[in-house]
Amino acid sequence: MLVSAKEMLVTARKGKYAVGQFNINNLEWTKAILLTAQENNSPVILGVSEGAGKYMGGFKTVVGMTNGLIEELNITVPVALHLDHGSYDGALKAMEAGFSSVMFDGSHYDIKENITKTKEIIDIAHARELSVEAEVGSIGGEEDGVVGAGEIADASECKAIAELGVDMLAAGIGNIHGKYPENWAGLNFEALGNIQDATGNMPLVLHGGTGIPEDMIKEAISLGVAKINVNTECQLTFAAATRKYFEAGKDLEGKGFDPRKILAPGFEAIKATVKEKMELFGSVNKA
């Protein structure tokens, strides 16, 4: 059964570890992440961008597939199905379809409109016992066509959004989506400290978890980051393993053309990446 992300993140923040949000793109992705969470006794958040939801045939399809896998694979660890970077309408549709958590990304609106719209989403979600993530100041890099420039969120704006009763807050601290460029300045821990002070005990979210050095990840967790999003890294390891399969000519051996065989190395690569992240974030055996 899907659960809200609220409790797992409040517990993670207190316990000084973080829960990984791993974005899903298809059945293989979802199955690999769920099995790895179960094997490592870790809570997990499955992230779905609006583009990925559309690709998989719509939000109801995603909910049906996820619930089916949880039941058939006997997954007992807490699992949240979370809309990533949702629009206002997208958040409403995801809640309607059965998501247990949504992110409303109002960071491209001015702060006043972001507050109004975020408050409306919170009221609807909380009436259904679902969790809500809000964003202040856009996260750099590219996420499904949403582009920002590694901004630092304003602590007073973070405070205003936190006071609406949001369950988790994504605030830019110099992090970006996708691969990090050579000249990246690193995370701004002073900004993170200020946001932490302004928002009290709010679990903070780090977007763009791929490519941030391990020591920075650990420091961010010690400063209140309780949710870390990973997407690009699973895509890269999946692509590399799949390429290797074809380069070795495996698809030409016997029934190597069977899609189940073609996708198996990538599936295992996702599992290995997720396990590595769960160990780094400290969520192993925290279910």
Image (cartoon, rainbow, N blue to C red):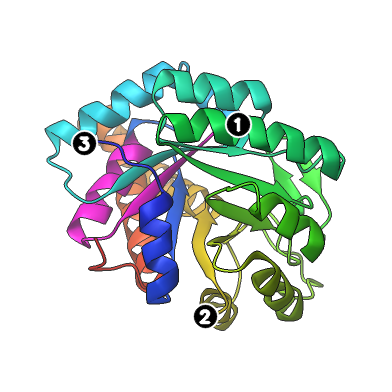
The quadrant holding residue 66 is top left
Q: Identify the magenta region.
A: 28-49
The quadrant holding residue 51 is top right
Of the image marks 2 and 3, the number of the one nearer the N terminus? 3
Of the image marks 1 and 2, the number of the one nearer the N terminus? 1
Residue 91 badge: none
Residue 70 badge: 3
* Real-space Cα separation, disc 1 to disc 2, in angstroms: 29 Å
- Asked if residue 157 can be seen in this view, the reply is yes
As displayed, is residue 108 above or below residue 15? above
Percent x, y of residue 233: 52, 56
The residue that mark 2 highlights is 222
149 and 132: which is toward the camera: 132
Asked if disc 1 and disc 2 are in contact, CB closer than 8 Å, the reply is no
Query: Which residue lies at the image location 61% right of the left edge and 70% below the top edge?
Result: 212
| Residue 41 on the magenta span | yes
28 and 79: which is toward the camera: 79
Q: Which amino acid type is shown beneath numbered disc 3?
A: Ile
Query: Which residue lies at the image location 67% right of the left edge and 74% below the top edge?
Result: 197
Q: Which amino acid type is shown beneath numbered disc 1?
A: Ile
Of the image marks 1 and 3, the number of the one nearer the N terminus? 3
Asked if disc 2 and disc 3 are in contact, CB closer than 8 Å, the reply is no
Percent x, y of residue 163: 65, 53
